[in-house]
Image: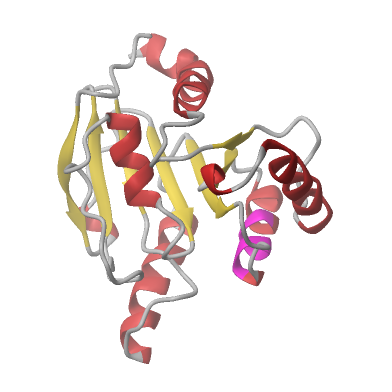
Amino acid sequence: MSIQFRKTNYWGAAADLASCPPQDRPEIVLSGKSNVGKSSLINALADNRKLARVSATPGKTRLVIYFNVDDKLYFADLPGYGYAKAAKDVKEKFNKLCDQYFTSGRRFSLVLHLIDIRHAPSADDVRMLEYMNQQEIPYFLVFTKCDKLSKAQIRKQLNEFAKILDFHEDARCYAVSAEKKIGLDDLRNGIEEFLSGELNDQ
């Protein structure tokens, strides 16, 4: 594997687009609900539990948090949606930051959209998938917390999701568990394969 995910470190936080890092390498955006496990997934991919701060209060992150992966790419952890216990004006501020991120023309290579496999996708999940399809934004669907279900239950859930979410049969879907280290190598390999052209051009 040419990307050493274990060589991942914290780069910084951005409250606006001007504070984002230079666009000198591929950028992978993590999106999803506040309590879906984005920070836990970053820690699991990097094999470092202390890397991304996992808040006891979902929705607390209100900035774009950047991680430098092996000096080859960035992870950009967007503020989550749908749960945050914050004042209305604060919610609107970081929702606006997410909207600007996708509509600003900033170049990013891939979106990892996380959905808790135990629960039906939210209206925000549906809208996000519709938007990425319309804008032809490349994405992987990453279904988290799969250790909580049996393999048969996982298959059933994925079939149900296919009825709700507009994604194709050949869409890249990954069932993972940050806690039990399930599916992480498949996701790492998928990211590396997807970025192979860009990484070779660096």
> Going 44% across and 23% down the picture, which residue do you hit?
188
Q: Can residue 105 be seen by looking at this rendering?
A: no
> Going 29% across and 72% down the picture, which residue do you hit?
57
> Going 66% across and 71% down the picture, which residue do you hit?
123
Residue 47 shown left or right of residue 156 in the figure: left
Query: Residue 22, relative to residue 77: is it above or below?
Result: above
Towards the viewer: 11 or 40: 40
Residue 124, how many percent across, how many down? Answer: 60, 68
Q: Which residue extends farthest bottom?
A: 88
Residue 128 located within the stretch drawn in magenta: yes
> Going 84% across and 54% down the picture, which residue do you hit?
163
* Quadrant in the picture for the N terminus: top left
Q: Can residue 22 be seen by looking at this rendering?
A: yes
Query: Residue 66, relative to residue 118: is it above or below?
Result: above
Identify the colour scheme used. Answer: secondary structure
Residue 74, how many percent across, how many down? Answer: 30, 35
Residue 37, how many percent across, how many down? Answer: 41, 53
Query: Residue 100, relative to residue 29: is it above or below?
Result: below
* Quadrant in the picture for the C terminus: top left
Predominant SS along the magenta part: helix
Residue 199 shown left or right of residue 13 in the figure: right
Circle count: 0
| Magenta span | 124-129
Query: Residue 190, relative to residue 111: is it above or below?
Result: above
Residue 164 located within the stretch drawn in magenta: no
Q: Which residue extends farthest front?
A: 150
Residue 185, how many percent across, how many down? Answer: 45, 21
